[in-house]
Image (tube, coloured by chain):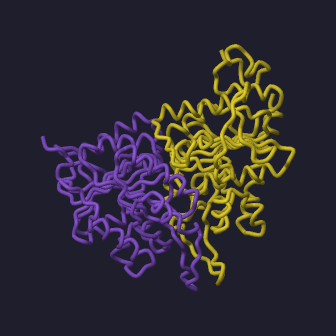
Chain colours: A yellow, B purple
Amino acid sequence: ECPGTSSAQAGRAAACQGCPNQSLCAGGAAGPDPDTVLVLSGKGGVGKSTFSAILAHGLAADEAKQVALLDIDICGPSIPKMMGLEGEQVHQSGSGWSPVYVEENLGVMSVGFLLSSPDDAVIWRGPKKNGLIKQFLRDVDWGEIDYLIVDTPPGTSDEHLSIVQYLSAAHIDGAVIITTPQEISLQDVRKEINFCHKVKLPIIGVVENMSGFICPKCKNESQIFPPTTGGAEKMCQNLNVSLLGKVPLDPQIGKSCDKGQSFLSEAPESPATSSYRNIIQRIQEYCDQRHFQEDNTI
Amino acid sequence: ERSNLAGVQHILLVLSGKGGVGKSTISTQLALALRHSGKKVGILDVDLCGPSIPRMFRVQDSDVHQCNSGWVPVFVGQDKNISLMSIAFLLEKPDDAVVWRGPKKNALIKQFVADVAWGDLDFLVVDTPPGTSDEHISTVEALRPYKPLGAILVTTPQAVSVGDVRRELTFCKKAGLKVLGIVENMSGFVCPHCSECTNIFSKGGGEELAKHAGVPFLGCVPLDPQLSQSLEEGKDFIQEFPKSAAFPALAHIAQQVLDGTWQQTS
């Protein structure tokens, strides 16, 4: 019988053996649960991994905070490359799998670290993917962490159901949903928002990526992905979710991702950087508010 | 009993490993270009979580009907020479999330492959979701008896995309699916105001990958706001914007498919 996620026995009772929440609960007994943020979209290629990487760097800028970045995109794991960790392998110790560290306070886990060649394909059906996600949650020895960011693949399928079930609503602070402005993305993102409602996952807010492009030469703006139905702004109004911010296209973003460097550090003057920083701040404020609410509930 | 795919001359899949690189875009533009060359084309959309094809033809609110041989596809265009099948037509509400695990997805895909009454088609284009999982395994298995021509792989130029597409190439090898070629999409943006070219998503990664993997390179398609707009509005880009930035590359891709330098020997 589960002793309860906030009990003193959380993660340490006999019944906890094998539960995917075990390490989170056990870690929590000595301190608070990490602030856990899922980065979702319904649509592929809108910038989930890009945002997850930037969020991780942004939060880890405070050296007093321990940040964990978990990549559960099993078929297309982008995080190792974006964090400059391509080719790294995972080590096992008595306490489990050790994450790969970018900085002392920023650890990363991804199926990418389990593959020996960049050509290796993970051609798995759902149940096998679920098994790995369970292992990631149970066997990775993060130590005590302040933030857990989970990067997901596009869609509303096995990976998404599994992460919500295994982490359980108690442990997830909320979801950040990424979109681009055009309706062809928004139509998938609305489904993702419905998914969140269905599984009772709080939505921190929506980020509109690739929101316009300013030509570096003539400074005119082009809407490469036009918001023909009002963009994320209209969708958020209609669905009563927060719009956390809009981020313009910037060739430096893709470059930084390809080189595995932090975009925020590489291009501090970019308008995209200030957008991202504002969004990160709003996420931190949201998480802090939840702490406050929890601490003040009997 | 005649199979529903017996009248289909050529089947080709549009794959990537990566999401959001333009699989559905390339599928629709290829279908439109083939139609304008006088071919009868069908598009089977096996992206169950994010079905984009119906919206790109502005028929997302259509319903599908059953006939004796199965589902009747939705016909689009003036001369109704493009037919579509997608889970989007089966959803009661467009914002309904399809939150299915693998086995349920597999069952529907088998049905989509076997039970759509396509009739006679020159080409069936199969649009897929990103990844190398249930949908891909099931689609390839279900199509195997009908000997598909192969797969067109779509990538964007940057390394993060190419990294996923390399894995998709491995999938094709393992599945015995011939790679017809690689398309490098979103390859550069020419500012409509001053004509300055900016490589927003880098450049050249798709071409390099084709070289490295020893597969044909089908061309670079630039970013084109007019193309994005056409897709949003369900317009026929190939017919209405032949002078637009992306047109020459898209027409060239279709021509290579028609030339069939990889035609199967019977």
A233 relative to B83 in the view: left or right: right
* Residue A193 shows up from this direction: no
Residue sitting nearer the eye, A142 or B114: A142
In the depicted structure, whether residue B149 falls above or below residue B91 = below
Q: Is residue A15 above or below residue A288?
A: above
Q: Could you tell me how many numbered marks the image carries?
A: 0
Does the image show residue A262?
yes
User: In the visual, does A287 lie left or right of A249?
Assistant: right
Task: Give left or right: position of B247 versus A259.
Answer: left
Q: Quadrant of the N terminus of chain B?
A: top left
- Expressed as whole percent of the image width and height from the top left, the position of residue B28 reads 36, 63
Residue under the point 41% across and 46% down: B48
Single out the residue that lies furthest toward the left. Answer: B1
Q: Is residue A232 above or below residue A87?
A: below
**At which x and y percent is residue B45?**
36, 52
Residue that appears at 36% across and 68% down: B253
Camera-side residue of B152 and B21: B152
Give residue B42's quadrant in the image.
bottom left
Q: Position of residue A263 (x, y in %)?
A: 72, 61
Q: Position of residue A30 (x, y in %)?
A: 83, 27
Please tell me which residue is depicted at 55% across the width and 54% down the height of the picture. Answer: B163
- Please indicate whether residue B96 sits to the left or right of residue A142 in the image: left
Q: Nearer the viewer, residue A94 or B225?
A: A94
Q: Residue furthest bottom?
A: B194
Name, please, the residue furthest toward the right: A64
